[in-house]
Image: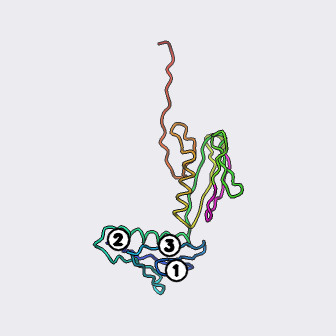
Amino acid sequence: MSRVGKKPVDIPKGVKIEQQGLSIKASGPLGSLQLDCHPLIEVEIDNKAGRILVKNDHPESRSSKQLHGTMRALIANMIAGVSKGFQKKFEIYGTGFNIKEQAGKLLFQVGFSSTVEKQIPQGVKVSIETGATRGDEVPARFTVSSPDKQLLGQFAADIHKIRPPEPYKGKGIRFADEHVRRKVGKAFTSGAA
C-alpha cells in the first residue's frame, strides 16, 4: 500500500466535487478542473465527512501501487488549486532587462537582439510588480498564478528556459527562491612575464 495513497483528501468549504464514471470534477472559488482517473484505482467521495478516499483494488501489482499515490496527489493538487491556487514568483537580473504584458503575451527584453515573446496559456494569470531592472542589484519582479499546478509548472519552466541565470554575474530569469551558484571570473596578472 502507498503511504501517500492511504491518506484521505479533505474537501474544504466552498469546493464542490462531482464524479461521473472515471472522471472527477472539482469546482471552487478560483475555477473548475477535471481529472480522468485510472481504471485500476477506485475513488470514493464522501460528501458528509468532507473527504475523498483513493483505493487500490490490486495491491499485488506494482503499477497499481505507483498509480495509487499518484492519483491521490493529483486529486489533492486539483482541490488545492480550485480553493487556494498555485503561484510562482520570478526575478530578472541584468542591466536593461525588462518584461511587458501585451495582447495575451509576455514580452521579454533579456539581452538578445530581439524581444522574446511567450504566449500566456488560458487559465494562467501574470502580475508584474516591477517591469524593468535598475542596475544589477534591483531586479524586475513578476508572479505567475493558476489553479492548475501542472499547467503552471510547465509555463514557469518555459519562462525559466528563455534565459537561465549565468554563474558569473547572475544575469537572467530566475525563480524568486532559486539560489544561483556564482563562479569567480578570470584573474588577470599584472607585470611582465
Extreme residue toward the right, this view: 103
Q: Mark 3 vs mark 2: which is more N-terminal?
A: 3
In the image, is residue 16 above or below residue 86? below
Image disc number at residue 187: none
State the quadrant of the N terminus.
bottom left
Residue type at mark 2? Ser
Judge from the rendering whether residue 132 lies leftward or rightward of residue 189; answer left or right.
Answer: right
Q: Which residue is mark 2?
A: 64
Quote the CA–CA distance across marks 2 and 1: 24 Å
Query: Which x, y percent locates residue 172?
Result: 57, 44
Residue at position x 48%, y 36% in the image: 183
Residue at position x 50%, y 39% in the image: 167
Q: Which residue is mark 1?
A: 17
Q: Mark 2 vs mark 1: which is more N-terminal?
A: 1
Judge from the rendering whether residue 181 lies leftward or rightward of residue 120; answer left or right.
Answer: left
Residues tagged 2 and 1 counted as in contact (Cβ below 8 A): no
Q: Secondary structure at mark 1?
A: strand
Residue type at mark 1? Ile
Which numbered mark, 3 or 1, is in the foreground of this view? 3
Q: Which range is magenta?
A: 119-132
Quote the CA–CA distance across marks 3 and 2: 17 Å
43 or 92, which is in the foreground?
Answer: 43
Q: Which residue is mark 3?
A: 35
Residue type at mark 3? Leu
Which numbered mark, 2 or 1, is in the foreground of this view? 2
